[in-house]
Amino acid sequence: MKKKVIDDISRIVGDEFISTRPDVLLTYTQSASMASDPIMPGAVVRPANKEQVCEILKIAGENKIPVTPRSGGSSLQEEVIPEPDGLVVELMRLKEITLHKELRSVTVGAGVTFGELEKYLKEHDLLLPVYPESALVCTVAGNVSVNGAGPGSSLYGCIGELVLGIEVVLPDGTIITTGSEANPNASGPYQRYSFGPDITGLFIGSLGSFGIITKVSMKVYKRYKFYDYNTYGFETHEQSEHFMVDIKQHDINGIFTSLYEGPVLELFMDMIGEELGIPAHEWPFSTVSMTIGSVREDLMKSDAKLAKKLCVKNGGHVIGISQLPKQEWNGRLWFFVRACYVHGWHWRTLYHHQTPTNAHQSVEVIRKAMDKYGFLGHTAGFVSGHSSFNAYPHLYFDPQDPEDEQKIRDAHKELAKALFKTGAVPFKMAEYWSDAIEGMDSYMALLELVKKTIDSQKIMSPRKLGGI
Amino acid sequence: MTEVDLEELMENLAQCRRCGICRDAVYEKMGFDGVCPVWKNTAGFETSFMRGRIQVAIALIEGRLEKTEENAESLYTCTLCGSCTSICAAEFDPAKCLESVRQVLNEIPNETRDTIAKKIIENNNPYVDENKTRRNWVKEVGFDIPSTGEVLYFTGCTAGLKLPETAISTAKVLKAAGVDFAVLEDEPCCGSVMIRTGMVVEAKENAEKALDMILKSGAKKILVTCAGCLKTLREDFRERFGLDMPEVLHVVEYLQSLITSGKLKLKKSDKTQKITWHDPCHLGRALGVYEEPREVIKAIPGLELVEMNTNKEAAMCCGAGGGLRSYDSGLAKKIAADRIRDAEDTGAEILATACPFCEHNLKDGAASIESNIKVVDILDLLAQRLE
Amino acid sequence: MDHSVVQKLTAIVGEEFISTRKDVLLTYSASASTSYDPVIPGAVVKPADTQEVSEILKIANEHKILVTPRAGGSSLQGEVIPKKDGLVIDLLRLTEIKVYQDLRSVTVGSGINFGNLDKFLNQYDLWLPVYPGSSLSATVVGNVAVNGSGFGSPKYGCIAELVLGLEVVLPNGEIIQTGSEANPNAPGPFLRYAFGPDLTGLFIGSLGVFGIITKVSLKIFKRMHHFDYNTYGFETPQEAEKFILQCKENEISATWISIYEGRILDFFLEMVGEEYGVPQHEWPPFTVSMVIGRVREDQLVSDSKAAKEICEQAGGHVIGIVELPREEWNDRMREFVRSSYIHGWHWRILYHHQTLSQWHRTLEEMWPIFDEFGVLGHTAGFQSGHSSYNYYPQIYYDPQDEEDEGKAKAAHKELAKRLFKTGAVPFKLAPYWVDGITEMEPYLEFLKGFRKAIDPNNIMSPSAIPRIEGEGE
Ligand SMILES: Cc1cc2nc3c(=O)[nH]c(=O)nc-3n(C[C@H](O)[C@H](O)[C@H](O)COP(=O)(O)OP(=O)(O)OC[C@H]3O[C@@H](n4cnc5c(N)ncnc54)[C@H](O)[C@@H]3O)c2cc1C
Ligand SMILES: Cc1cc2nc3c(=O)[nH]c(=O)nc-3n(C[C@H](O)[C@H](O)[C@H](O)COP(=O)(O)OP(=O)(O)OC[C@H]3O[C@@H](n4cnc5c(N)ncnc54)[C@H](O)[C@@H]3O)c2cc1C
Ligand code: SF4
Ligand code: SF4
């Protein structure tokens, strides 16, 4: 990167907060994404506020330098891998939190993680009821940028559904606020759908391609006081899948509803069952693990009772092991990370959404890929909103065996194609999806038009979103 | 075992999935309110916490990053406090690995590291030329202390040379408890800092010398007041160098039973003061000694123990460890000041710890922000309250 | 309109479905928006399906003909008034409905109104739980295009929150499907946030400026059969606001919540009280009329009890008159129309969202303006989602008195300005807001950028959203 550019940016953020040292740059060549090729950026800058972000983007624009916004760096699908000699804008210094209690909302800076927010909201007896499983490291803004989901989504949907508005710095340095806060007189965020077309949505899942989000405003809720944890066993796919639909249809507050195939659950339990104090059990063909949460006890009890009834109605049986859902929910900020890393394998994931009644299709497609390529792995998932199911397949490989890694990369690519054919959809439009997508030309053309309109120079994360 | 098994080390380093939780996780359930003190108190680039350090380490070892002093900086701007290890979900110990990396890469120039090692080898301590002065404090305790005996008080370099009050207090307390103990004539350094900074060959040489002197004194039990000495003598001597050591105890571990058995009598007090406890990394996270010092404090009349926001497994570090105090004293002090603020937040008047190295750095930190909190060693507290 | 263009259009839809007759055009010159000047278009065309819409737009684009998409024609803020000699595309022939029971969703064509859909879903014991007051004429797609809300919104938010995806024809004729159905293999609509950025939202509240929505997919739910109706009285607005906030926080499943100021309620009941069988009552300064709805009876019993407790904690008292909320709810597809038209006045409306806790602010601004301008009117509204309140002040005028109408217009304009200053937001970006909007240039510029990119010839509903049009307008 040209020295003049570096000097100009230094003037904005101070020498301390920009680096071009090879050791520092090296640590920005990658993220939590495994089996991905590192790419060396030209500089990393850590702005303190939106004004600095704005000035930085102006300079990047003038010099046509590709920019990659970065926050937690925990993304798994290469979303935050920078451009060669590009500029990484790391946003972790934007740490502000403003609570709007009477609006039931909170505004957080791009550097605030779910863990930090959880602590803050807890003091007010509130919660942001969607927790990606990487909650201790990933930021709310970063999760909005990838449109994530996690524990809590079974009731509230993906993170996109909780957004009330954002503050974003566009590639040309313009700062806009969306939602009700677009009105500078507004007392805070209270309505996303204000002022005509919803432009908030454009930035949800945008992977940084349209600008840098400096703040997001989210709905918050009163914390649950009463919980029911239970496991439900089924003998066929249809039974467990229809149970999941029934739960939603009957207005049961299942805040986290996961589905495990027998062998997958056995594998998990082998790895961490004991650590989590989950009793040994002959798990059935498929198991639904559900946490019901409510602010009122009688509602929770009524839900729990009905859930059992619906389980039996669908041909299942109530297993009664509460430790699994309890650990999933209570340990939601850490449990899954542990489950991901307790074994020695590295893995690639292939996040996607299915319909709940199609969950078995993901399992089948993945099993086929495993057989064909001969690798280990698994998939499980959870209800992720009104009628979707978030599956997170893991494809294992030995990190020190390049051949093994290549195999996984190939399998992964093929798997994305096969999943697309089952009707699955990504929620993070990672690069590998662009090969898998067929029959969506006009959609991609519109996306490209949006990109061109907002970022005519294509400086923002140019390879992301299928390289539009 | 002074040699690092490189293959095993690389395998361990590969366990890092770059998830980044070791940066600033806030997780009440495990007590965390932030993780890496260095990340928090620097410009905060990825190189300032474990995820980045590991990437740099791997790249240096694999030769993808040139082995220069600057490129290796992030390996040394780490207190090895182990906070990252406590929260890491993967099956390896990142802080311990980093220690091994320092050893594997110890050909990379680092003047601070080399100077300390040289001083210790030459002088038996990292601070002064004349090691014998470290026993000067004995003159001030008012009774004689032999240099041989079954119970050895191993003072440590910092207490001996920088904070003799702690040594004096310890002597008084032990005496009051009816313990006959000895202090070596020309006490050597435990070599902790050499191990931490990767100078393991030198450390081994030093350890053998130290053990020899200890054994010559007739010691069956070694008491220490320094958390660093404790970990080194109790754990590293055996595990790394295969040395057969007598039992090593921190005085707080030893005292707990003396207090409960009533051997040590303490003055009553009619006013209560709030006190908070800083867990030294080498005492707490490294060896799991959390309760003993708390029990001791609770047994002291007139003190009310309040916990800091982060404590025990999740305690923030004082900033001195891992050679950081020598490598970047400014940063070490900044971290200490941060810890002082944690202590102030509890409303305590006193911040107690059980490691002269922590105490020394925390005092500097307190001074740097003009804090009024009193930083003391737990033994000073006890000594003041002896009947 | 140029004859050759009309011919081309005729070739697409057939003679029956295009008209340039004066009488016909006249009926498309206005909508339910009173106090807006009628404008005679050049032609009206009624396509049968998406393909025809696409072809029509290609022609319009080629000839730079100004297009106004029109569905129910029930909009109140001039949104659907066409351009002189422009083309109205009436979308009522697209009447497909497809239900996906497993996916808990439905897809409807742009000609389906809420009444049609409700009847259809009722067969399955399902519903789309947001009903605008104009349900019997407003189409679902039209309501998405204006981002409306209505009965059911206290629990489910505005209509936008129920959208799972849509099919839209861009001004150049390109057909786009958003949401999970963008995947041609998808079994139906099940997720809005698929394939990266949410493109669906761009068309919600777009008033037709980015293209014509031919289908929309929405979340549907099992129909509720258990309801509790009640009224709650309060001495101050803050108490009433607090009551509602706490009901929301405590998971009270209210499908309808309306706060009435005493004098407005009296006025309202004078008009429809008897018709609805609402007993005489000395209404308190503030009354909350609330409907709690549940799928299960035990949930309802619990909610109803909890609501009473919360009311008393908030300093209010349970009035116990059930007829008001019950009739509002049961007649939800017509009630609002009835009460709007039972008297002889015409009115201008000023839809906006206020924060729930600032409910009183709108009234504080409204009454003095009414006095100042010497107009009559009132406002009603309802709680509309997570923490907002949907207001619709109506300013009355005598339709046969121009001066009176002028006063209403002036008051309307001033009210928009002052409401903006209270932090209120429009949800339909109607023209009169634009005068009230200050310090939002970058925002409008942003929209303008899209407008230019998606519709370079500026043919779609020009001036529907003011200040976002490019040159050449
Ligand atoms: C163990 C583990 C478990 C996980 N589980 C889940 C899970 O359950 N659910 C889930 O959704 N994800 C999960 N993830 C993935 C990851 O945590 C999410 O993608 C997360 O949202 C990324 O947030 P981040 O702050 O780390 O963003 P980064 O990784 O830094 O960036 C992610 C993307 O967003 C862009 N971006 C970041 N910040 C901004 C900004 N301020 N403005 C514009 N663009 C920006 C980046 O350019 C990049 O494209 C998991 C990850 C790990 C390691
Ligand atoms: C008595 C009464 C009560 C009302 N109560 C409510 C209420 O409670 N809540 C509420 O939200 N509204 C209410 N309205 C307003 C009105 O009914 C809504 O705005 C309604 O959604 C309009 O739908 P429509 O089908 O009539 O659309 P139209 O009036 O035909 O069009 C409305 C707007 O959408 C555009 N449009 C229409 N169809 C399409 C399409 N297919 N693609 C792109 N753009 C399109 C038009 O160009 C226009 O800008 C009420 C109206 C009346 C008369
Ligand atoms: S050291 Fe552990 S916590 Fe830190 S990034 Fe690596 S795996 Fe994650
Ligand atoms: S050992 Fe301590 S200082 Fe070093 S990286 Fe880990 S947390 Fe940071």
Image (cartoon, coloured by chain):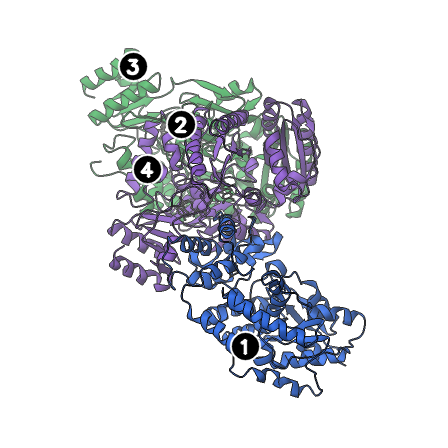
Chain colours: A purple, B blue, C green
Nearest the viewer among A265 and C21 is A265
Residue type, label 3: Val
Measure the C-alpha gap from mark 2 to mark 3.
27 Å
Q: Amino acid at mark 2?
A: Ala
Q: Is residue C217 visible?
A: yes
Give the quarter the ligand 2 occupies. top left
Is residue C346 visible in this depiction of the protein?
no
Question: Which residue in the structure is indicated by mark 4?
Answer: A467
Q: Amino acid at mark 1?
A: Asn
Residue type, label 4: Gly
- Subunit under mark 3: C
**Which residue sits at x=47%, y=51%?**
A108
Spatial distance from mark 4 to mark 3, Cα to Cα? 39 Å
Q: Is mark 3 within 8 Å of ligand 2?
A: no
Residue highlighted by disc 3: C13
B220 horizontally vs B79: left or right: right
Label 2 to label 4, Cα distance in Å? Answer: 18 Å
Discs 4/3, front = 4
**Residue B99: horizontal and vertical position, in percent?**
51, 60
Report the residue marked by disc 2.
C182
B339 lies above or below C457: below
Point out the frontmost of discs 2 and 4: 4
Q: As rendered, which of A201 and A194 lies closer to the eye?
A: A201
How far is the residue under mark 1 from the one under mark 2? 71 Å
Q: Chain of mark 4?
A: A
**Chain letter for mark 1:** B
Do dots 4 and 3 share one subunit?
Answer: no
| Same-subunit check for callouts 1 and 3 | no
Foreground residue among C2 and A332:
A332
Secondary structure under the numbered disc 2 in the rendered image: helix
Find disc 1 in the rendering and name its residue: B125
Q: What secondary structure is found at the residue carrying circle 4?
A: helix
